[in-house]
Amino acid sequence: MSLQAVPGTDNARGQRLPRSARRAQLLEAAQAAFVESGYHAAAMDDIADRAGVSKPVLYQHFPGKLELYLALLDKHSEALEQLVREALASTQDNKERVYATIAAYFDFVSRDGAAFRLIFESDLTNESAVRNRLDAVGLVCAEAVAEVIAEDTGLTDEDASLLGMALTGLAQVSARHWLAQDSDVPKDEAALLMGALAWRGLGSFPKVGGEGS
């Protein structure tokens, strides 16, 4: 009696997936499980089923559930950092920079798959490896903003760092609230509203060289 091919397995595809493609498939399945159920309730059996693979195949790529979770944190932390850095580099106009940076957080929380929940709403913050990654991405994004503030205003690094953390904190909290409320306010309009609020504060610091705010 021949084995029936199961969709998503190597037999069903007729060939083995390249390692990178299989890894991406497993991460996608794990993300869906973690977002839906949380880390503690998500099971490796469920993740394997979602990916259409056997548990041995899953364990060939990831030795445990924590390794899957950390890989997802690394992936989406890098994505958020890239969005923030691209926003800061998108213009030399500081008002537009503020708007673009806040819009980056609204874009991040709006992405398919709700990956932002792993970064901003993790249920595994008591695990040091997770906590370290979450702290790191928050700090990296805030410091990227702080570098621009310090360069353009002449504020001390400490003052600029505090302002950078305030701006990114405002951005992520307001973006998550907007999404959770299923607001009738369009995403771009909501980001502009928060940008206007932030710019009223940041724009009051004189620019180095006396060229205005």
Image (spheres, rainbow, N blue to C red):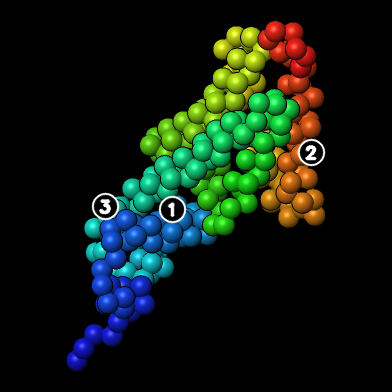
Estimate the x, y position of residue 53 in percent, counting from the top left. Answer: 32, 69
Estimate the x, y position of residue 120 in percent, counting from the top left. Answer: 56, 42
Q: Residue furthest left?
A: 1
Can residue 26 be seen in this snapshot?
A: no
- Which quadrant holds residue 51? bottom left
Residue 157 is left or right of residue 136, and the answer is right
Residue 119 is left or right of residue 90, and the answer is left
Residue holding disc 1: 40
Mark 1 vs mark 3, foreground winner is: 3
Please tell me the numbered disc located at residue 31. none
Q: Establish if 188 lies above or below 3.
A: above
Q: Assign a secondary structure to mark 1.
A: loop
Q: Assign a secondary structure to mark 2.
A: helix
State the residue in front, 46 or 195: 195
User: Mark 3 or mark 2, which has the lower sequence index?
Assistant: 3
Residue holding disc 2: 193
Q: CA distance from mark 2 to mark 1?
A: 37 Å
Label 1 neighbour load within 10 Å: few <14, some 14-19, many 20+? few
Mark 3 vs mark 2, foreground winner is: 2
Please tell me the numbered disc located at residue 63. 3
Q: Amino acid at mark 3?
A: Pro
Residue at screen point 79% across, 38% down: 193
Residue 173 is left or right of residue 14, and the answer is right
Label 2 neighbour load within 10 Å: few <14, some 14-19, many 20+? some
Q: Amino acid at mark 1?
A: His
Residue 45 is left or right of residue 143, and the answer is left
How many marks the image carries: the answer is: 3
Q: Amino acid at mark 2?
A: Leu
Q: CA distance from mark 1 to mark 3?
A: 16 Å
